[in-house]
Image (spheres, coloured by chain):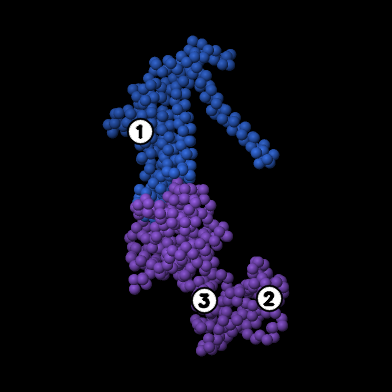
């Protein structure tokens, strides 16, 4: 029972600024050693929630529990959390060693124990050679690692990350992302990670909490969120999605087969979950479509669509196509194929191509068309 | 170096440098040079029209002023008042500056304008009514009267300067310190002080200089028995107009202030550097 108690539990957290509902009954929990991301566009309340967990923002209602203990009324300095700030928030007048040791000094650790811990953490983030430097003398990536080390040094119950990678360039971001994740796994710390970058969330998390306008839209493992988005917002926010209004025309619930009418054409959908309404949104991902060559078209019957290519973007590893049924009006869909894959290199704007979408690739959203 | 700029930019830069030099000459070199020359005019050989330079140079004016007037006491008065005023002003300005720099509240903009408004009042007008207030309050000490008057009138400057300093304090550093368990004192030392130090020093020195140079309050409250350097200076510009003596006194008044400004500049730079690079 004790080992099962979540390291962090947020229950019905609500907060209102004047007329703006920043958080509306948000609940989630993180088990020990889990990395949970709060994902959403700016203004969705993710940072406010993180600051509420740290104790900087008092909640109107609901509660935050850290290792089973209610945090109501406990100020940030007495909470067992440590935050990695977006701006790094390193003390500019202190050396790297003094920055990393800052939290330990507040805990009144003995000098030798502190030095040992600082050196240990510095080694983990590969900063042993920079201990006597000042933050201004470090690169952005190094400063980021100092911020990480400073938070890790105190062995907090919960580590809080506030968009820690947003000030790094793209290549470094991927590298630091992998580093944070592997350190988190190796050290086993519990972490809440705020980001607006869905790729970051998918790559790092054990659990993704997708938020919009102070409300949790969906919560789940990265694969769940990507493969089984709950609604149009989640489908669209995480990756790229083709979302179509569909009408169920025939259904075979025992086998999980449904025939639907869509703007793309008639489609057969295989789904374990029945649609929530006869008129429902249907989603598929750009990589779910397969370009079919001419000689196999005759042998295929289901979910074959002829589309005209409207634009083609070469992305190196992928080719991104935009295609629709007519010349240039009406709905269009995004299709991505591997650059080396069949047919994609031969397809140009204006060409007609045939695509196939397997029935299990379609996904009903839990959102009826109104 | 020259290759850094294209010809057009080079000419523009040269023109700007020339303009700065001309400005510097007319604003500083010329007045200072004239003051030095005038203070060295020998009393028995006046400097009059056809002579481009004083006919005889001597330090007799300086010796005369130093030995026969109350200048020594005036210097002591001016500097003790200024020191008291600058410390009192900073201490009184801190809470208001904190509120302006770090808090959001209704009517903040109006309050900020109100604190600056006294600067629009002519000091002479203020001083005349201030004297009556002092006597009503039963404050008869000239020193205290001038010190309080200066403190009140210079508060707007200090509040303004320190507000800027307080608003420069980074909230993320305050948060980071608290998040890591820092006490209030530690938060102040590591998040506030490095940023406030230059502003505190600047405010201290600027208030100090303004107090030393202030005339209206010092004259109206202090005269005739409490003299400061500006009151002595003005006595040479009144009925008994003696330009060489005035030149000497004005140099005595201004030179330390210029030096102080230079020191302040150095302090500000080193304080700014320690905020970013030095260990503090």
Q: Residues within 10 Å of mark 3 (few under 14, many from 20)?
A: many
Residue where numbered disc 1 is placed: B84
Depth check, mark 3 against mark 2: the one in front is 2
> B9 and B212: which one is in front?
B9
Discs 3 and 2 lie in a common subunit:
yes
Q: Is mark 2 on a helix, strand or loop?
A: loop
For the residues marked 3 and 1, what is the alpha-carbon distance in whole angstroms? 73 Å
Chain letter of the residue carrying label 2: A
Query: Which residue is depicted at the point 48% across and 57% down?
Result: A125
Q: What element carries label 1?
A: helix
Residue where numbered disc 3 is placed: A228
Q: Residues within 10 Å of mark 1 (few under 14, many from 20)?
A: some
Q: Is mark 3 on a helix, strand or loop?
A: loop
Total numbered badges shown on the rendered structure: 3
Coordinates of residue A232 in the picture (x, y in percent): 53, 73
Please tell me whether residue A239 is drawn above or below residue B244 in the rendered image.
below
Q: Can residue A12 be seen in this view?
A: no
For the residues marked 3 and 2, what is the alpha-carbon distance in whole angstroms? 27 Å
Please tell me whether residue A193 is drawn above or below residue B131 in the rendered image.
below
Hue of chain B?
A: blue
Residue where numbered disc 2 is placed: A342
The chain shown in purple is which? Answer: A
Q: In which quarter of the image is residue B196?
A: top left
């Amino acid at each position: 029972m004790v080992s099962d108690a979540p390291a962090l539990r947020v229950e019905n957290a609500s907060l209102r600024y004047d007329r703006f509902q920043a958080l509306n009954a948000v609940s989630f929990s993180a088990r020990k050693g889990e990395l949970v991301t709060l994902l959403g566009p700016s203004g969705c309340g993710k940072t406010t929630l993180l600051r509420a967990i740290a104790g900087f923002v008092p909640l109107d209602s609901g509660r935050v529990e850290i290792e089973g203990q209610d945090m109501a009324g406990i100020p940030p300095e007495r909470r067992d959390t440590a935050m990695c700030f977006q701006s790094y928030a390193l003390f500019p007048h202190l050396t790297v060693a003094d920055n990393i040791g800052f939290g330990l000094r507040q805990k009144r650790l003995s000098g030798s124990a502190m030095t040992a811990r600082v050196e240990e953490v510095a080694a983990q983030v590969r900063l042993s050679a920079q201990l006597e430097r000042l933050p201004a003398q470090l690169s952005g990536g190094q400063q980021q690692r100092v911020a990480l080390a400073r938070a890790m040094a105190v062995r907090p119950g919960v580590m809080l990350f506030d968009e820690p990678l947003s000030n790094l360039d793209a290549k470094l971001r991927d590298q630091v992302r992998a580093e944070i994740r592997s350190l988190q796994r190796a050290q086993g710390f519990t972490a809440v990670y705020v980001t607006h970058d869905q790729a970051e969330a998918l790559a790092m998390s054990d659990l993704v909490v997708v938020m919009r306008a102070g409300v949790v839209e969906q919560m789940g493992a990265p694969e769940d969120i990507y493969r089984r988005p709950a609604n149009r917002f989640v489908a669209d926010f995480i990756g790229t999605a083709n979302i179509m209004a569909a009408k169920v025309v025939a259904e075979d619930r025992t086998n999980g087969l449904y025939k639907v009418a869509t703007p793309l054409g008639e489609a057969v959908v295989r789904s374990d979950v029945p649609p929530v309404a006869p008129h429902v949104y249907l989603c598929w991902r750009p990589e779910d479509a397969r370009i079919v060559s001419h000689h196999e078209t005759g042998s295929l019957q289901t979910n074959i669509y002829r589309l005209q290519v409207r634009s083609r973007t070469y992305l190196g590893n992928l080719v991104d196509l935009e295609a629709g049924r007519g010349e240039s009006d009406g709905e269009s869909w995004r299709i991505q194929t591997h650059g080396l894959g069949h047919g994609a290199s031969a397809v140009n704007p204006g060409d007609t191509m045939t695509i196939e979408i397997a029935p299990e690739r379609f996904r009903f959203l839990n959102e009826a068309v109104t | 170096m020259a290759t850094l700029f294209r010809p057009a930019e080079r000419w523009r830069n040269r023109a700007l440098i020339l303009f700065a030099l001309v400005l510097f000459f007319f604003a500083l070199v010329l007045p200072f040079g004239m003051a030095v020359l005038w203070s060295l005019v020998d009393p028995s050989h006046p400097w009059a029209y056809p002579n481009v330079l004083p006919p005889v140079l001597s330090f007799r004016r300086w010796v005369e002023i130093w030995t026969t007037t109350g200048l020594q006491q005036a210097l002591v008065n001016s500097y003790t008042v200024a020191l008291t005023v600058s410390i009192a002003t900073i201490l009184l300005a801190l809470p208001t500056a904190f509120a302006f720099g770090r808090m959001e509240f209704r009517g903040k903009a109006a309050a900020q304008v109100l604190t600056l408004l006294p600067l629009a009042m002519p000091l002479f007008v203020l001083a005349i009514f201030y004297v009556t207030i002092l006597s009503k309050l039963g404050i008869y000490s000239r020193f205290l009267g001038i010190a309080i008057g200066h403190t009140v009138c210079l508060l707007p400057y200090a509040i303004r300067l320190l507000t800027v300093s307080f608003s420069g304090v980074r909230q993320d550093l305050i948060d980071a310190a608290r998040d890591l368990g820092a006490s209030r004192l530690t938060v102040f030392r590591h998040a506030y002080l490095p940023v406030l130090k230059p502003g505190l020093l600047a405010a201290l020195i600027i208030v100090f200089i303004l107090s030393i140079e202030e005339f209206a309050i010092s004259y109206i409250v202090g005269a005739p028995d409490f003299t400061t350097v500006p009151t002595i200076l003005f006595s040479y510009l009144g009925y008994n107009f003696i330009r060489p003596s005035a030149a000497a006194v004005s140099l005595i008044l201004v030179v330390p202030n210029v030096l102080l400004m230079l020191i302040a500049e150095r302090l500000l730079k080193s304080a700014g550097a320690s905020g970013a690079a030095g260990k503090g």
